[in-house]
Image (tube, helix red, strand yellow):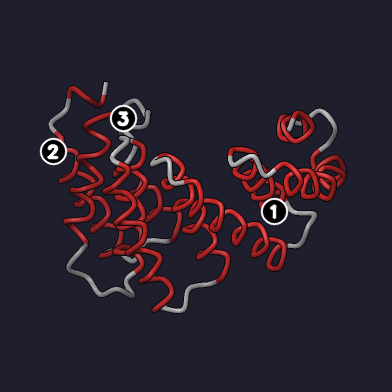
Amino acid sequence: MPKMYNVSCLAEQAKILRKEAEDNKSDVDVRNERWARWHTCGLCEQLHHGVAYCALGWACWKTYVGRLETDQVRQLAMKKLGNDLSAADHDEDALSVQEAEFAMMRRLGASELDLLSVQGNLACTYEALGRIEPALCLRRDVYFGSLKVCGEENMTTVISASNYANCLLSLQHFEETKSLLLIVLPVARRVIGERNDLTLKLRWA
């Protein structure tokens, strides 16, 4: 199991393998495979978990934090740290990292789709902290942003609509929820089918 290994050794291995790929100017598939060592065991190919997972997030960030903001690997390291902190239920810390990531991506002129992805992560963290009102604002932005960028008959848009509906329900905004679902449910039936789990959840809502 991954937890039997020293985290510093796992971090050093991931660092070396990724650097080799960069030095050798390897293709994207190889670089992605090497990057996976930051979150997946090279022996059993299982995701790291618990304390090791969170510790590797910090180790990854410390490895690449010195690079320029525009460096893709630094950006990946920041995203990984935020995700790992969230997975370990360190939600306040995760929120700080995700807010910093969002601000950085806006400065760098990231695509609207990438910004929507970070906003979705922020919404999840706000919900985990019980801060539903700011989460609702983000869920609304992500849904309408997805609608604009991807169109209504897109899985990303349907998922964002479901998340928005759930957030509305948690605040007992029943009329808004009903209006949204009457629009989204027929789309979900066309795009992913009547018996898809997400369609069934929308029908239940």
Taking the spot 39% from the left edge, 47% from the top edge, the residue there is: 33
Residue 82's spot in the image, x, y percent? 33, 50
Specify which label sits upstream in the sequence, 1 or 3: 3
Front: mark 1 or 3: 1
Where is residue 148 drawn, in percent x and y?
71, 68
- Give above or below for 20 relative to 10: below
Closer to the camera: disc 2 or disc 3? 3
From the viewer's perspective, is residue 154 above or below residue 149? above
- Residue 73: which quarter of the image? bottom left
Q: Is residue 133 left or right of residue 172?
A: left
Going by the image, does 46 lie left or right of 110?
left
Residue position marked by numbered label 1 in the rendering: 157
Mark sitting earlier along the chain (2/3):
2
Secondary structure of the residue carrying numbered label 3: loop
The type of residue carrying mark 2 is: Cys
Query: Looking at the rendering, in which quadrant would you find the C terminus?
Result: top right
